[in-house]
Structure formats: C-alpha cells, structure tokens
Image: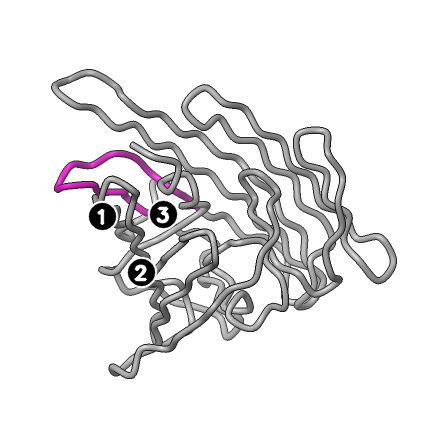
Amino acid sequence: MDRGIARVLAVLCVLALAAPAAADGVPADGHLEFAAFRRGSDIGRGTYRFSGDAARREVAITVDVQVKIAFITVYRFAHRAHEVWEGSRLVRMEAETDDNGTAHMVRVVRDGDRLTVTADGRTSHASRDAKPLSFWNRGIMTAPEIIDPVDGATFTLTVQRDPAPGESYEIRNDAGLRRQIAYDADGVLAGFRLWAHDGSEVEYRRIAPAR
C-alpha cells in the first residue's frame, strides 16, 4: 500500500447518504462520517466535525486506515487535523500524522499577508489564500496554492469539472496526484476516489454518524 492512501484527510466518497446542509457546504448537524473501502474491504473511517459559523469556522478531522492482507496488517495510517477559518481564509491548522510508522507534524499560521508552514521542523511560506487539501471545502478548486496537511508540501492543482449532472471534479498535480470529488445539491462533500500507485482504488462512502 502506498502513500496515496494517506492523502484521504481527510476525506470522502462517491456514494452518499442524504443529509441536511447549510449553504456553506457544512452539514446542519456539524458532522460527517465516512467508511473507507479498498477492493471491497472496509479499511477504516474518516470524520469531520464542524463548529462555529461562516465568520469563524473550526473543523476537526480524523482518519484511521488499516489495510490487511491474509489477516496481516500491511499498512496503517492515522491522521488528526484541526483547521480554523475566518470566512474563506485559513487562520491556523495543526496536523499530526502516522503514515505507516513515519510521523509528520504540520503547523500553519497566518502571518500578515502570507501563511507560514512548519512541517517536520522545516519552515516555508504559502500565499495568504492557500488552502489545505481538505475536500469538504470546494474552495480548493480555485485556490492559488494547496498545502498538503500530511507533510506540508505546497503545490497547484489542475481542475477539470465533470460535464455529467451534479457537481463533481477531477483534480491532479504534477507529482501524480489524481482524485475525483463530488458534492451533493447542498454543496456538501458527497464523494471521493483516489488511485494508489499499485493501481488499487480507494473509495470513502458517507455513513450515518456514530453518536
């Protein structure tokens, strides 16, 4: 299993259950939960928990994935992130990831007219309108720069909108990332697919949140 699966944050599906939603793409109950599948097997869960309002929004993200072959765990991924937004701009993000034994820590803070990104002890900068690769937020489709919440890498996206009915996109970058993302009629994340380097497809399906 390769690192492509790690970029699920955050996450994320093609088939979805209907849920009430606010106009800004956040579900009315403030909670999204997804089950991850690879080659027909349930490999984990991803959740989003929203608080605040459009003026100041906080998002807590968790992803836990475990891939087994013949009952032997061959890949584990655990991700925790916390985003703080003021309107459409990121104010702060902290993320911790265990990518199959490799640990990453990413911190992003607004610093005047730019964002300062500290990833595994290295510091860089991104534009003030950069956004983390967090698929609940359709703003990534038009963002001038993307920040990977797993390792802090920055890049731009090539975005193609699917002409089929509904709102769905395919996004790519120069490093080989490819994702298909769909949103429902309320603008809430309704689907996500990725393809790993081994050719396997990973799909996250929205499920009723656990209470």
Type of the residue with mark 1:
Glu
Q: Nearer the viewer, mark 3 or mark 1?
A: 1
The percent position of residue 164, horizontal first and vertical second, equals: 25, 81
Numbered circle sitting on residue 201: 1
Q: Which mark is residue 33?
A: 3
Q: Label 2 neighbourhood size at 10 Å, few (<14), some (14-19), many (20+)?
A: many
Task: Say what secondary structure mark 1 lies in.
Answer: strand
Residue 119 vertical placement versus 92 (above, below) = above
- Region rendered in magenta: 34-47
Secondary structure at numbered mark 3: strand
Classify 132 as above or below 140. Answer: above
Residue 183 sits in quarter: bottom left
* Residue 191's disc number: 2
Residue positioned most to the top: 72
- Quarter of the C terminus within the rendering: top left
Q: Secondary structure at mark 2?
A: strand
- Of badges 2 and 1, the one in the foreground is 1
Q: Counting residues from the N terminus, which is met first, the one under dot 2 or under dot 1?
A: 2
